[in-house]
Amino acid sequence: MGIRSRAVAGVFVMLIAVQAAAGCTRGHGAPAPSEAGDPSFPGKPAKPATLEQLAARTGCKLETETKATELRQGSCKTSDGRYTMLTFVTDKAKESWLGAAKEWGGTYLIGPRWVIVGTQQNLQPFYDKVGGEIEAGDDHGGGSRHQGHTPSAS
C-alpha cells in the first residue's frame, strides 16, 4: 500500500470509527454474538459482493458513496438503523482496514472482501441476508460515562 493509499484508507478508518464510537453498544453489556459464543450466529457462508449488491440485499439505497484505490464505501439507512458498507479490492486490504478500525470499537459484519459496520442490533438481520460473521471491536468499557475514543500518538 502506497503512502497516498494509506492516507486515504486512514481517513476512511477515522470516518467509520466516528460512526462506531457513536453506536458503541458493548459498554452497555451487550457482547457481540461471536464473543458471547451465541450458537445462532456461528459464521455463515458469504460471497464477495459489490456495494450495490450489498445495498440491495440489505434493503437500502446508497446515500453516499466514496471510492479509493483499495476500497469503496457507502452509507445506508433503513428501518433497522444507519450503517456503513465497505468493499475491498482484496481480503488483505480488508484485514488491514479491520485491524485499524477495530481499535476504535464498533460492531462489524464481515464477509469476503466486504464489511458492514453498524450496531449488533442492526447487523443481525443483515447476517441472515448476506451471511458473514459478526465481530466486535475493542471494548472501551464506558457505559453511560463513555468519553469517546482518542487515537494514540505514534
Image: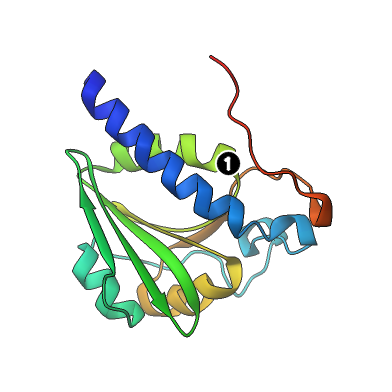
Along the viewing direction, whichever of 31 and 141 lies nearer the viewer: 141
Q: Is residue 59 left or right of residue 21?
A: left
The local crowd at label 1, few if under 14, some if 14 to 19, many if 20 or more residues have their Cα within 10 Å, is many
User: Which structural element holds mark 1?
Assistant: helix
Residue at 74 percent of width and 44 percent of height: 147
Residue at 48 percent of width and 41 percent of height: 101
Query: Residue 121 at what x, y percent from top left?
Result: 59, 74
Query: Residue 112 at what x, y percent from top left?
Result: 31, 54
Along the viewing direction, whichever of 17 and 112 lies nearer the viewer: 17
Residue at 19 percent of width and 42 percent of height: 68
Which residue lies under the disc numbered 1?
A: 104
Q: Is residue 23 left or right of residue 96?
A: right
Query: Residue 83 at what x, y percent from top left?
Result: 44, 66
- Can you say whether 29 is above or below 53 in the image? above
Residue at 29 percent of width and 69 percent of height: 63
Residue kind at label 1, given as amino acid type: Trp
Query: Residue 139 at what x, y percent from top left?
Result: 70, 45
Q: Is residue 76 left or right of residue 30?
A: left
Along the viewing direction, whichever of 20 and 108 lies nearer the viewer: 20
The N terminus appears in which quarter of the rendering?
A: top left
Q: Tell me how many marks there are.
A: 1
